[in-house]
Amino acid sequence: MAERKNPTVADVMKEAGNYIHLPENLALIEKAASYASEKHAGMFRKSGEPYFVHLVNVAYILTTLRVGPKTIAAGFLHDVIEDCNITREELAQDFDDEIASLVEAVTKIGNLNFKGKDDPEYQAANHRKIFIAMAKDIRVIIIKLVDRLHNMRTLQFQPEASQKRIAAETLDVYAPIAHRLGISSIKNELEDLCFYYLMPEEYYHIAHLVETKKAERDAAVNKMIADISAMLKSHKIKFRIFGRSKHLYSIYKKMVHKHKRFDEILDLLAIRVVSQTELNCYEILGYIHAKYKPIPGRLKDYIAVPKPNMYQSLHTTILGEDAKIFEVQIRTEEMDAIAEQGIAAHWRYKEGSRYDAKAEQKEIEDKLTWFRDFALYSESETNTSATDYMELLQKDVFEANVYVMTPKGRVIDLPAGATPIDFAYRIHTDVGHTMVGAIVNDAIVPLTTELHTGDVVNIKTLKGTGPSEDWLKIVKTAQARNKIRAYFLKKESEKREEKIEEGEKILIEELRKRGVDPKEFMDRKKIDSISTGFQVSNYNDFMYAIAVKSINPSLAAERLTNVKQRSTEDGNLSRVLNKETVHRVSKSGLVVPGVESMKMSLAHCCLPIYGDEIIGYITRNEGVKVHRVDCPNIKNEKTKLIHVMWEDADVDRMYDCDLSIICNDRPHLLTDIVNTISQCKVQLDSINVTVNHETLTSTVKVSMRLRNIEQMNNVFANIRKVESVLSVDRTTH
């Protein structure tokens, strides 16, 4: 990589002086430089350079972004708390609370311990902290990005293992943040530096291809620039025009992800025209299309519909002489500044205007709606699993590249493949929950419709409705998936509360049949003390089990009171079964409370596993068939059901379990699933795959044997972590 000359404090002051003129503001920057130089005296980097050199570089880059004096001062001071034993209070006293807060926040982000993609718990927590820091003051992440940029420029002095770790962290975390903030100048350089350290062979290969074609490419670009310039001058339009280099990592990504050869990448020959006004931009586009043949489908108007990171420009691809293809970007000076510096350009320091952090943050949130939504999510969803959070971060935010609009013109960014359901949940949770249909570009469409950039989406809602569980198989964003899951978890919780109340009423009635006062025995501690004998762990589980008929209320009342009194229901049951009331275990590991030696077996349709909520079904010739309480085959049965329960767990007993796994098809999918199941230490009996070539999805059917519901849940949780897996469900035959 090319070496750069280190700037000096004088260079920083000169660059700052180009837009900062008040003596007190310049004095603040000089004071911060002097303070940092003093506190870091005697400290050196691994390059052998004084540590202060790093701080000067950070401050200088910040001045090129035209940030305010306090931000530049914080750039000089950003390591004094961490490295110089200076407290936040001391720094606030020597400067002010605003600068101290900036330095403290940058320090906290710098102390985050990223452990790579294999440690999602750490990553989730750390990413959340970064976005919360951004939400409070965008200047924090600007300083941190610049700090990381200079560290990457000097990464050659680190050991190889540290180089790869820091580069991977930068590519996963900081480059995407720079992209979403629209700071392409930093994002592009970070990506190329990471590319250099992570994939040196590929880096040099691309660099060689670029260099070998450089002379030919430069000649073609220069000729096209001369031709366009002559044409625009004849129309008396003010403009700047220059060739644009494609950074190496973006070339590599296009070659890998889009399976293109180097010579197939259309925008390698790139020209940018910068003019004065929006009207000029459209004029220039018209003149260029009048002279050169545009390639169909390659015109993009990001002026009328800006990207969510505020990027604006006209893009067109034209056919030049000798069939050479050129990408032309047309934009105003302001758009060009925002394209390179993103939010930093929008929020450039204006001399004489008083900085108001809250007002500035509000303006930024209005400009970057994705940022506001994600910051709120990061702060509020503290109980979100690390896996879900990371999926949301990577897919919903960093990879969002489809831009669709509401009927009022608000632009919503979504990942590729997103559906109207994803769109609805991005608007608001209630819009998602109550949606009943979608209109895209004035046409009613199925909810499975894939949205594309430029689509106008209108969501139809109906109060009192709710989402379908099938939506979990349709949505592409983690945000929508989490909201749908949360809805059903809440419903399940509400249903469970109702069942607990129902169980309490049933038990109270049983206690009254025994002539005892329910108040004396409806005590949580008393019930907790007997609950383990019924294979439940607490009061709520006990009452729920009574309500769903997995605990016999008569037996529960008997255990609780030591008063034996057979209820009419129990008497009828005994007569039906023609048995004495004795508590006895069957060979199946199941028991009918109050009945001896009952023939029982597990139903093959729903394959209950130890720990499932179960119910017995009285058959004509096969005794009692035990089903899961949610088995659809007994859903409407009212008269032939009896209470059954699991006896104490048998560690040697194994249960059949069939799964259906829906996945996006990809190479090595089956291998990954088999390895995952194997790691869970269960017995795999069979596995088969069917592929739907229209939807590019696979259905994997798995048969296995395991000991209990906890082991099954562990298998489910690990399979869901496998890349491309959409859903995992137990099979009902």
Image: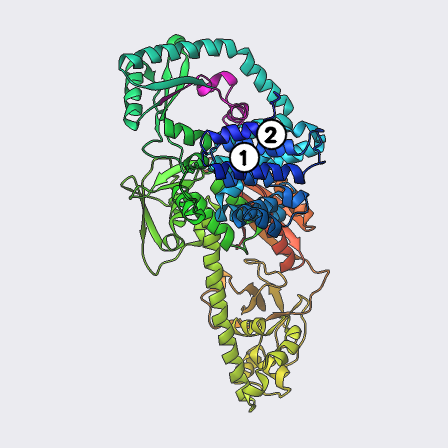
Q: Dot 1 surroundings within 10 Å: few (below 14), some, or many (20 or more)?
A: many
What residue range appears in magenta? 245-274
In the rendering, at what x and y percent does residue 616 appear? Answer: 56, 69
State left or right for residue 211 relative to residue 320.
Answer: right
State left or right for residue 707 relative to residue 567.
Answer: right
The reply to whether the magenta stretch includes residue 207 is: no
Q: Is residue 93 above or below residue 27?
A: below
Whether residue 662 appears in this view of the structure is: no
| Quadrant the N terminus occupies | top right
Q: Which mark is residue 558?
A: none
In the rendering, at what x and y percent does residue 219 appear? Answer: 45, 8
Q: Residue at x 57, y 66 (%)?
A: 614
In the image, 721 versus 532, the foreground residue is 721
Q: Which mark is residue 194?
A: 2
Q: Residue at x 55, y 56 (%)?
A: 383
Q: Which mark is residue 175?
A: 1
Looking at the rendered structure, the secondary structure element under dot 2 is helix
Looking at the rendered structure, the secondary structure element under dot 1 is helix
In the image, 429 versus 537, the foreground residue is 429
Q: Is residue 277 above or below residue 380?
A: above
In the rendering, at what x and y percent does residue 339 appear? Answer: 43, 30
Identified by mark 1, the residue type is Ala
Quarter of image, res 585: bottom right
Identified by mark 2, the residue type is Cys
- Cα separation, mark 2 vs mark 1, equals 9 Å
Whether residue 528 appears in this view of the structure is: yes
In the image, 14 versus 387, the foreground residue is 14
Q: Is residue 526 above or below residue 114?
A: below
Instruction: State yes or no: discs 2 and 1 in contact (Cβ < 8 Å).
Output: yes
